[in-house]
Structures are given as C-alpha cells and as structure tokens.
Amino acid sequence: MKIFGKLTLAASVIAGLGAATVAQAHGIWFAQRSNQLALIYGVGAEDLDMVKRLPKVKTVAAYDENGKEVPTQIAPNGPLLLVNTDNKPAIVAAILDNGLWSKTPDGKWHNKGKDEVPDATKSEHTIKYTVHLRRLNVAPPVLPAHKLQIVPLVMQLPDKMGQALTVRVLYEGKPVQGASVQADYVTDPDSEPLKTGADGTATIRVRNQGLNVVAATLATPPANPAKTNSDEHLATLSFVLPNLPE
C-alpha cells in the first residue's frame, strides 16, 4: 500500500470542518441478501428504499485481487439493487450523490440548497462512497473517483472479532486528519467515533463475526458556497468474517 507524504494546510482546514459532521447521517454499503450482493442505503438497522435512489448512484465498479477493474452492473430486482458478481470480483465499490439538503429551525430536512430555503440553519451537499472486500486477503486500490475512502493498512484482514485493525482515511487520495471513524455503522451506529491522526489513521476493534461496516465521515468546504455551508462525505468499508461451519 502506498504511503503518502505530509498533510497540506488545506487538509488541516478540512479536518476542522470534519468535527461538525452530522451524527447518524445515512450511508451506503454492500451486504448479502438471499445469497446475492446488494447495495444498501441506511444507517444502523435501517435498510431504506434503494431502488428509488438508483438515479443517484453515480458509479458502480468491481476489481480483481490485483486491483484491476472487471465488468459489472447493478440492476433492480424487486426491492433490491443487486450487483452482478459473475466475474467473481474481489472488490466492489460505488458512489451515491445524495444532493443538496437544508435543515430548517423545526428540525426538518429539505432536498434543496440554502438559496431556496431562506431560514435554513444548516445546508450541505452529501456524497456517499463504499468499498466492499469480498475476501479478507485483498487490499482495495486508491480510487480517484472516491473523494473519501477507507483503506486497511494490512493485506490480510483479521478473521476474529475483537482483533485490532488499523485503517487510513484518504481525502482526494491523501491522508486526512480529524475524520470521524466508527468501527461498525450497522450494529453500533451511536458509538463514539475515533478521530484520525496526522497520518490519517485510526485503530479499531473488529466488532462482528460476520458483516462489518466501518464508516468515516468528513465535512469539507463547499464546492458551491451559494447553495451549501459544507460538503459532507461519508465513506464505508465493509467485509465479512467467517463463522464456524455447522
């Protein structure tokens, strides 16, 4: 895994904004549904309608164990969005652009920028990223399209819950300080997040002997200040630890 150089001053500014990231924002991840791989949108036990959000899915990609991209597609199947894994990819990834959201004093969120919501107390552009490792002995490539990405610092992931795992959070391909990291976004979404250090790393304990969804959040200066106060990035890294055979 390539090690990156020193953080820039801009990254430090980003880290400061990261502390203001909204708790319990929804994210995306991949999980098995009826022996098939599905793209999920939610937080904790919430598994919301992904089919109606299909137009917001900007990219879906698959890679072999060497990080080489292989063909794949995503398509609705009943209430699910399923990924074609016929090529037996080692890694799959996706990006969902959730658009502009503004919060009014009554606590409600509106799918508009602050230019359309005059009394907005907060306005943000939210983007979701996810990478899923289908094997425990592969490392994801750095994906340029993923502004925020979580990468493990080991080629072989732990195979037992409770073991330590150090991850690095990258923003635009470089380590970022101050990103919030949660060890499991699905089974413990209210946990107190860790903050990445100057090298962009955080060490967590693998929570589940099954599906694990590690999450990182970071708020950055807005790409369009006229419409939002910040851009909110939420990235997940998911993998499955094997359980004992029957």
Image: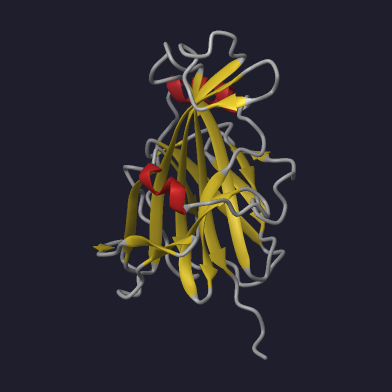
Q: At x 31% / y 43%, what residue is drawn? A: 144
Q: Residue at x 46, y 60 (%)?
A: 132
- Outermost residue on the bottom side: it is 246
Q: Nearer the viewer, residue 99 or 155?
A: 99
Image coords of residue 56 (percent x, y) = 39, 42
Whether residue 97 sits left or right of residue 232 in the image: it is left
Residue at the front extreme, as displayed:
78
**Does residue 3 appear anywhere in the picture?**
no
Q: Specify the quadrant of the image occupied by residue 129.
A: top left
- What residue occupies the far top of the structure in this picture? 118
Q: Quadrant of residue 81?
A: bottom left
144 over 12 or under it: above or below? below
Q: Is residue 209 left or right of residue 122?
A: right
Give coordinates of residue 63: x percent, y percent.
32, 63
Q: Quadrant of the C terminus?
A: bottom right
Is residue 137 visible to us here? Answer: yes
Q: Along the line of sight, which residue is nearer the eye, 28 or 152?
A: 28
Q: Position of residue 93 (x, y in %)?
A: 39, 55
